[in-house]
Image (cartoon, grey):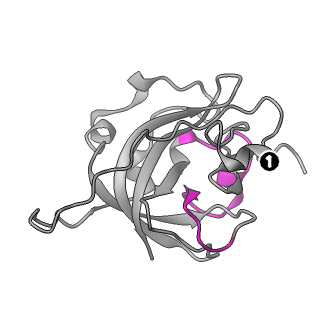
Amino acid sequence: MPRLLAPLVIGSALLATAGCGEQTSPEAGSPENARLPAGAAPIARPATPPAPRSPAQPRTAAPREITFDDIKLDMEKGAPFSPDLLPERVTALAGTPIRIRGYILPSFQQTGLTQFVLVRDNQECCFGPGAALHDCIVVRMRPGKTADFSIRPVAVAGTFKLEELRAPDGTHLAIYGLDGDEVK
């Protein structure tokens, strides 16, 4: 198998990136470190979980429906990423509740996923070498929320983030994140 995917360790699941780069690992000191590849860099996790919404706070508006085309960048596959490549239409989404459809990248864990990679499609374009960075989103489910793997497309709702994830050698693995609220 050619260099299709390098493993990406996220949470307790070993995931393959959607052409988004090299190896990485969970936060240093976590139980998953026992399974880390040599030289893997930890994924930074938020220091504190988001504060729960009090019953007095109004419900947030319905998530904005977007597609992977809405977050597509004007860059060649495999080209180096720079934040100045992000158009205003993408940076404006940061911190916004969204819903996006895609595929959960297969991993060893099938149920109770707290973190996973959502990809544009399950065709060779996303899994092959040189897939574009804008074709994947690292989803971290909010505390108490989980997802189950499906071979069918899923709709993921949550808060969109601009979040660079890099390999130990500095190459980008992903540039988008999502604090997941729901996977259907």
Q: Amino acid at mark 1?
A: Arg
Image location of residue 153, percent across then percent down: 54, 73
Q: Secondary structure at mark 1?
A: helix
Instruction: Decide if residue 3 is on the left or right side of residue 172.
Output: right
Q: Quadrant of residue 41?
A: top right
For the point 70% across and 54% down, the residue is 15
Q: Which corner quadrant of the image does residue 155 belong to?
A: bottom left
Look at the image and tell me whether residue 154 can be seen.
yes
- How many residues crowd mark 1 within 10 Å: few (<14), some (14–19), many (20+)? few
Picture quarter with the C terminus: bottom left
The residues colored magenta run: 110-133
Find residue 89 and report its horizontal and vertical position in percent: 28, 40
Q: Determine if the magenta segment contains residue 129.
A: yes
Q: Assess whether residue 169 is covered by the magenta stretch.
A: no
53 vs 85: above or below:
below
Residue 97: image location, x then y, percent: 28, 56
Residue 17 visible to an observer of this rendering: no
- Image coords of residue 118 (percent x, y): 55, 58
Residue under label 1, please give it.
35
The residue depicted at 73 percent of the width and 43 percent of the height is 33
Residue located at (10% from left, 65% from top) = 58
Depth check, front residue: 121 or 180: 180
16 above or below 157? above
Would you place residue 67 above or below residue 162 in this image? below
